[in-house]
Image (cartoon, helix red, strand yellow):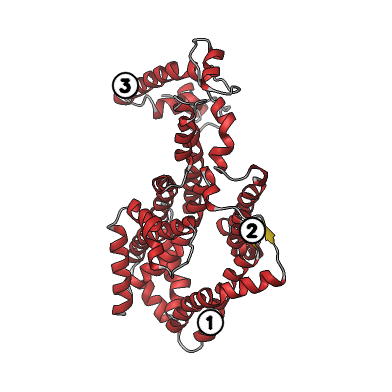
């Protein structure tokens, strides 16, 4: 190359090239399809098989869903409207939705369980989302008593007397904590029990005689449908977590008696099917109560379901505690924290964070297992579907009822799952 030619050609470009569109295969939907569905021969074959399955499924179900009948008074009327064509008869949902949701609850009082459900969302909001005002937690604390009065009714002083038991437990804990932390825990448990056994009923009777306030009483046998699943499921989930934490801590305790009681309880509950505990709640629990005592069946079921879920929750949380490095416990000791402060500020938050996926599984399983109450005479949505199908109007209908019930359970279980994923992302502190 000559010197003249070398001097006229630059080795470095002194102007920028104009921007160009990326290749079609490197942008948008085409890129996503190529990378996720057609990246190699094996994935391409699986994609084509999946598309074929989806196509044949939609081809079979599509006409059935598109021909849906929503307004009819019976299955025979649905068939007359369809006139031999393929189609779903969701008119049964339109006709019996109130039974599937509320059971045999008086129709004039539907506003009470509806209001209780709306207030449930309000009470859960500050617990699930920390960016809301913390003052709302006061309403979360009193909500169980408000919900009980809305659902069952009766004298307003009955839930008030029950709430005063927890107040007595808190006062006992504060007073005894100055002496001994462990004794304060026992005092916090025993004080409410003594109040409920000795003073709750006289207080309720006295105040009802002085100032009779309340709502119309609704018996538990009027409950049913999705209402009973919500009552048992939400109560069991709410109570099993704190009880499971205490059982997990008790199982790791150095005190032989406390550890033995927790181990025996957990292993016994985990070794017995839930349906056996439900039959125990239905048939045998009254034998252990004082003569003449009438203990509501739904409350008995809630107790058994809570104990069952708490045993599994204790093992999940114990796994989270075991996963923490020993240095975290040593750090708490180095800071001079006592046992309860160390658990509250350092140990338990990390253990619960680790255990989030394991905690969610028992919650979802518990909510779905509420359908087992049909075996002890409580008509959950599945039990009511059998009652609806036994009527002459809707005898022979199946899929429509089960699709509706499955959709309701899916919405709640999917919501729990998505919230757990949100919580995991929010609490994530590593870079993985």
Determine whether the residue tagged by mark 3 lies in a helix, strand or loop.
helix
Q: Which residue is found at the position 63% from the left and 57% from the top?
A: 153
In the foreground, 254 or 297: 297
Q: Which residue is found at the position 54% from the left and 85% from the top?
A: 175
Between discs 3 and 1, the one toward the N terminus: 3
According to the image, label 3 marks what residue? 45
Q: Nearer the viewer, mark 2 or mark 3?
A: 2
Outermost residue, front side: 292
Between discs 2 and 3, the one toward the N terminus: 3
Outermost residue, bottom side: 179
Local packing at callout 2 (Cα closer than 10 Å; few below 14, some 14-19, many 20+) is: few
> Left of 304 or right of it: where is 9?
right
Q: Which residue is found at the position 51% from the left and 39% from the top?
A: 408
Indicate the position of residue 242 as horizontal and vertical percent values.
46, 65
Which numbered tag is attached to residue 132? Answer: 2
Indicate the position of residue 3 as horizontal and vertical percent values.
46, 27
According to the image, label 1 marks what residue? 172
Local packing at callout 3 (Cα closer than 10 Å; few below 14, some 14-19, many 20+) is: few
Q: Quadrant of residue 34?
A: top left
Q: Which residue is found at the position 52% from the left and 18% from the top?
A: 76
As measured in the structure, the alpha-carbon distance from the residue carrying label 2 to the one carrying label 3 is: 49 Å
As measured in the structure, the alpha-carbon distance from the residue carrying label 2 to the one carrying label 1 is: 30 Å
Report whether residue 3 is seen. Answer: no
In the foreground, 209 or 268: 209
Question: Mark 1 and mark 2 in contact (Cβ < 8 Å)?
Answer: no
Report whether residue 414 is seen. Answer: yes
């Amino acid at each position: 190359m000559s010197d003249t030619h070398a001097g006229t050609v630059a080795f470095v470009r002194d102007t920028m090239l104009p921007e160009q569109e990326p290749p079609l295969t490197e942008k948008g939907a085409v890129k996503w399809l190529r990378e996720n569905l057609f990246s190699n021969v094996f994935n391409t074959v699986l994609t084509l098989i999946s598309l074929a399955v989806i196509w044949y499924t939609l081809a079979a179900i599509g006409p059935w869903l598109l021909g849906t009948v929503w307004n009819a008074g019976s299955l025979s009327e649905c068939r007359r409207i369809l006139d031999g064509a393929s189609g779903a008869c969701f008119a049964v949902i339109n006709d019996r939705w109130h039974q599937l949701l509320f059971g045999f609850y008086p129709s004039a009082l539907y506003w009470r369980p509806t209001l209780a459900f709306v207030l449930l969302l309000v009470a859960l909001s500050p617990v699930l989302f920390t960016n809301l005002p913390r003052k709302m937690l006061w309403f979360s604390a009193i909500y169980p008593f408000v919900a009980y009065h809305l659902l069952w009714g009766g004298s307003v002083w009955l839930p008030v007397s029950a709430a005063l038991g927890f107040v007595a437990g808190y006062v006992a804990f504060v007073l005894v904590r100055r002496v001994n932390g462990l004794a304060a825990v026992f005092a916090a448990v025993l004080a409410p029990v003594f109040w409920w056994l000795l003073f709750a009923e006289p207080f309720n009777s006295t105040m009802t005689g002085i100032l009779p306030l309340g709502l119309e009483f609704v018996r538990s046998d009027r409950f049913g449908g999705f209402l009973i699943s919500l009552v048992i499921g939400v109560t069991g989930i709410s109570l099993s977590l704190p009880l499971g934490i205490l059982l997990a801590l008790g199982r790791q305790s150095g005190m032989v008696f406390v550890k033995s009681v927790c181990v025996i309880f957990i292993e016994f509950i985990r070794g017995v099917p839930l349906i056996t505990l439900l039959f125990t709640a239905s048939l045998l629990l009254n034998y252990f109560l004082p003569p003449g005592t009438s203990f509501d069946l739904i409350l008995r079921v809630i107790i058994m379901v809570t104990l069952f879920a708490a045993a599994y929750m204790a093992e999940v949380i114990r796994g989270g505690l075991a996963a923490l490095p020993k240095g975290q416990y040593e750090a708490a000791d180095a800071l001079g924290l006592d046992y309860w402060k160390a658990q509250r500020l350092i140990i338990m938050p990390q253990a619960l964070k680790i255990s989030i996926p394991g905690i969610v599984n028992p919650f979802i399983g518990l909510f779905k297992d509420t359908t087992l109450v049909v075996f002890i005479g409580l008509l959950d949505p599945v039990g009511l579907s059998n009652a609806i199908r036994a009527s002459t109007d809707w005898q022979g209908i199946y899929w429509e009822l089960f699709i509706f019930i499955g959709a309701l359970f899916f919405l709640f279980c999917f919501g729990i799952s998505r919230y757990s994923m949100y919580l995991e992302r929010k609490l994530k502190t590593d870079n993985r």
